[in-house]
Amino acid sequence: MPITQAEENYLKAIFKIAEKGDKPALTNAIAAVMQTSAASVTDMLKRLADKQLITYEKYRGVLLTEEGHRLSTALIRRHRLWEVFLTEKLGFAWDEVHDLAEQLEHIQGNGLIDRLDNFLGNPGFDPHGDPIPNAEGHWTYRNQSLLATLQPGTQGVVTGVDDHSPTFLQYLDQLGLTLGAQVSLLEQFPYDHSVRVRTGDGRELVLSEKVSKNLYIKLLESGN
Amino acid sequence: MPITQAEENYLKAIFKIAEKGDKPALTNAIAAVMQTSAASVTDMLKRLADKQLITYEKYRGVLLTEEGHRLSTALIRRHRLWEVFLTEKLGFAWDEVHDLAEQLEHIQGNGLIDRLDNFLGNPGFDPHGDPIPNAEGHWTYRNQSLLATLQPGTQGVVTGVDDHSPTFLQYLDQLGLTLGAQVSLLEQFPYDHSVRVRTGDGRELVLSEKVSKNLYIKLLESGN
DNA sequence: TTCAAAATTTAGATTAGTCTAAAATATTTT
DNA sequence: AAAATATTTTAGACTAATCTAAATTTTGAA
């Protein structure tokens, strides 16, 4: 039997939990991501286990099977390619595309996604800087670090965000810290872990710990 | 409460039945279009009537309300715009786009369709020559006739098809009778109502009644 | 105009996905 | 290690959308 949209959404949630800390994904964690009750999650885990998309041990959490992993990767590919389409071709802002891509990722069709990928010029990253797996499910890795982990004196370019919420993204727009923006870290304040940075266009900004922990920076090869 | 995808599909079916012959749409006719049982249709008609999208009289069939008409028109607009996207931008053939557009038409989102329309250059017609209603729900009409109804000696251009099945569309591809192709009607054979035509590139074809009844032609203004 | 055939609706079930409340299991604290 | 707390599962119920079979209503032909 076919995989439903609800099942796809659970797979993606499990994948995202597995990404950080590759322990089994626990019921409550999945319920939190899916914004639903633990009981509903348990029901769904049984269905996914029946379909061999996860291995499920009562009270112990779940792991993706190879097939489950393949499907979630494909789903993330579809999601991120549609996000690129929405921003690059239709002119949506990076804080507007998530809900639409959430629907578009479930569209099923022969060769649709590969044609879309091609039409978009085979982008490596989505509008939030997240990598897009290729048709074989392989990822491009990139050397990036959270701004919060850098040493003063380092310079880099904004390459991604960890928080995808519209409020964070809009705040970054206001600060001029969109993808590709240059920043150099001037100073860290131990008191509240805020940081002072200089932007590419010469402005100085103070960023809270919350911001610096959600902003990925790729270090510039210091010209030496 | 929101309109579901299933409800949208029924609305579209009712709209299509209402188009030809503006009598109420009957249960069996809807069941035929939806490829489902009459009992399922009756259930759904009650739901649609509850939501004031149709007026329903038991055993008498249904009519769209103003709201139902507005929603079906918007749905057809979405379907046809996505078909243009799939052919013009992703390079699908006109016989491949229906099922994908059937899914894409249900995507809900702020301003998505108007942005898509704009991106596509506000097309007036879809890849099968069907008109695309504008954002206000208004249609562009076009003077076209079925090839079967023309008089010998007339000349025109292929502007649309009534049968959207892949087999018919692929047959037209083979014959070179795609949208924009020139044809002049040479002769009608009373025996089986087939016709002989000359194409723009000088070939002569004999077309069955089935073909000529499914092919729309716009007459050329005879240069006189 | 009656009655058989056709069309439609109702009745009763099923499935996927969800819920709340209660029960079971696991973890943490003392 | 027992008790308290947290987590997870089960039980039972609900909705939307579908089905088949039976009942009802309409149609149209003799």
Image: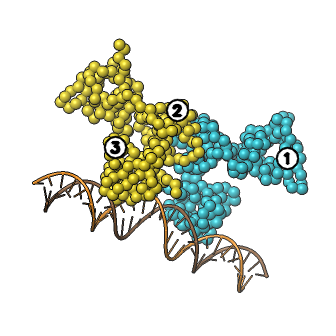
Chain colours: A yellow, B cyan, C orange, D brown
Residue A72 horizontal/vertical position (percent): 45, 45
Foreground pick, A49 / A99: A49
Q: Quadrant of the C terminus of chain A?
A: top left
Q: Answer whether labels 3 and 2 touch (C-beta < 8 Å).
A: no
Q: Point out the residue furthest to the top here.
A: A224
First in sequence: mark 3 vs mark 2: 3
Q: Is residue A67 shown left or right of residue B141?
A: left
Residue under pointer 2? A122
Amino acid, disc 2: Asn
In the picture shown, does residue A172 fall above or below D19? above
The disc label shown at residue A22, or none: 3
Q: Determine whether, in the image, residue B1 is placed left or right of residue B94.
A: left
Q: Residues within 10 Å of mark 1 (few under 14, many from 20)?
A: some
Q: Quadrant of residue A214?
A: top left
Q: Position of residue A198 (x, y in %)?
A: 31, 21
Q: Residue at x 62, y 61 (%)?
A: B35
Left or right: where does residue B173 sit relative to residue C12? right
Write the residue at 33% across / 58% down.
Answer: A58
Q: Amino acid at mark 1?
A: Val
Q: Which mark is residue B206?
A: 1
Front-lying residue, B150 or A110: A110
**Three-letter amino acid code at the position of disc 3:** Asp
